[in-house]
Image (cartoon, rainbow, N blue to C red):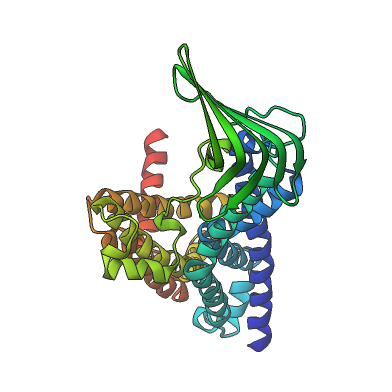
Amino acid sequence: MKLLHRQIFLELCKLFGLTVSCLLGLILIGRMLQLRTLFLSQNIGFFNILQLFFFLTPFFLLLVMPISTMLSVFLTFLRMSTDNELTALKANGVSLYKMLPAPVAFCALCTLFTFFISFWGLAWGMDMFKVKLYEFARTHSKFSLQPGVFNKEFPGLTFYAHQVDNEKGILKFAFVRDQSTQGASVVVVAPEARIISSPKTAEVKIVFNRGKIFRQDGDELNVLKFNTYSVRLDLGELLGGFNFTEQKAKDMTFSRLSEIRRDPSKGPSQTPRFQRKVDTEYFKRLTLPLGCLILGMFAIPIAYVFRGLKQQYGLVLSMGLFLVYYSMFSIGVSMGEAGSIPPLYGMWAPNILYIFVAVVGIKFANEERTLPIVDWIAHLRGRLRRAEA
């Protein structure tokens, strides 16, 4: 039995690695195509883009882990059923219950790993994504000032510096022209300026020292001297309106979500809609990891029912069954955030339904019986064929 469990577990791990790699690759390519305008408009290198997507991996893994677990278990038992290995084991007195330790241990490990991503990895990845995107925008984007070159990346603003020290952030003989106010033009000129970055607020502040301000409003021109003058720039505007400072429920740690649920006043917003999003995200972080164990167990009786099915068709079938699960889950998320139903019910409904089918299905599969719904479908197909004849 140890040898049998080891072989099943190894096959599950091999299929799991292949499935996760393929799904993550497809998702990352799709997301890269969505963000191509953002990245191509800046001087961000290919390896920098890969680094950004690495920090997005926990977010995608939270969605990929349940289906990868389900596909691994389904394809493993479907192959064993197609090759008559299950029949041979059954003939030698090995029931389905005796084969369960390997898939249960595999699904439990996947569930624990997904819980780790859900509780800590997701928030870490999103925070690092914002920090790195800010750094790349500040140091590699077109806004990086070059000596003797006019920069017009920000709407209504034009920057110029005769000398630029990017390492120290020092500008010599610098000026900025502000035309953001209709009917007025402001020009700031100074022999020296410094660039000060603020990653927390995603702002870059250019501080001019001992210069002059020329303000033209119609035919009137005013000249002012100053010791220090600051121009604040939001790098989010440079990246197509990306918001670095907004605190979203999906970017928070699980402990932070729990804290806001206990005391809504500690959240960045006290609106009912935000509280519903926090509740929905809280239960989402609990139910998705458990989906690995539930869907994995659900896949075993499904593989028994569709024994003899080719693997390519089995793959399509399992994807369709997961699509039903994820559609129910997405509907629960939407209705929970909209306030149509409590998030608790919407998030747990798919898991409860699939748990019931898994338990009943494993019992029927162990007894070499098919589910009543399968008999009904076969009976209906027979009647349709006879009617056509």
Can residue 247 be seen in the rendering of this structure? yes
Residue 192, image x, y percentages: 68, 41
Is 207 placed left or right of 341 in the picture?
A: right
Q: Looking at the figure, which quarter contains the C terminus?
A: top left
Residue 251, image x, y percentages: 46, 58
| Residue sitting at x 50%, y 51% | 201
Q: Residue furthest bottom?
A: 2
Count of marks overlaid on the render: 0
Q: Nearer the viewer, residue 233 or 256?
A: 233
| Residue sitting at x 40%, y 66% | 287
Q: Nearer the viewer, residue 123 or 9?
A: 123
- Write down the quadrant of residue 183 in the picture: top left
| Residue sitting at x 58%, y 32% | 212
Is 332 placed left or right of 39 in the picture?
A: left
| Residue sitting at x 23%, y 53% | 272
Can residue 312 be seen in the rendering of this structure? no
In this picture, is 133 found above or below 241? Answer: below
Q: Looking at the figure, which quarter contains the N terminus?
A: bottom right
Q: Nearer the viewer, residue 204 or 325?
A: 204
Residue 309, image x, y percentages: 58, 55
- Write down the quadrant of residue 29 in the picture: top right
Residue 262, image x, y percentages: 27, 70
Q: Nearer the viewer, residue 305 or 244?
A: 244
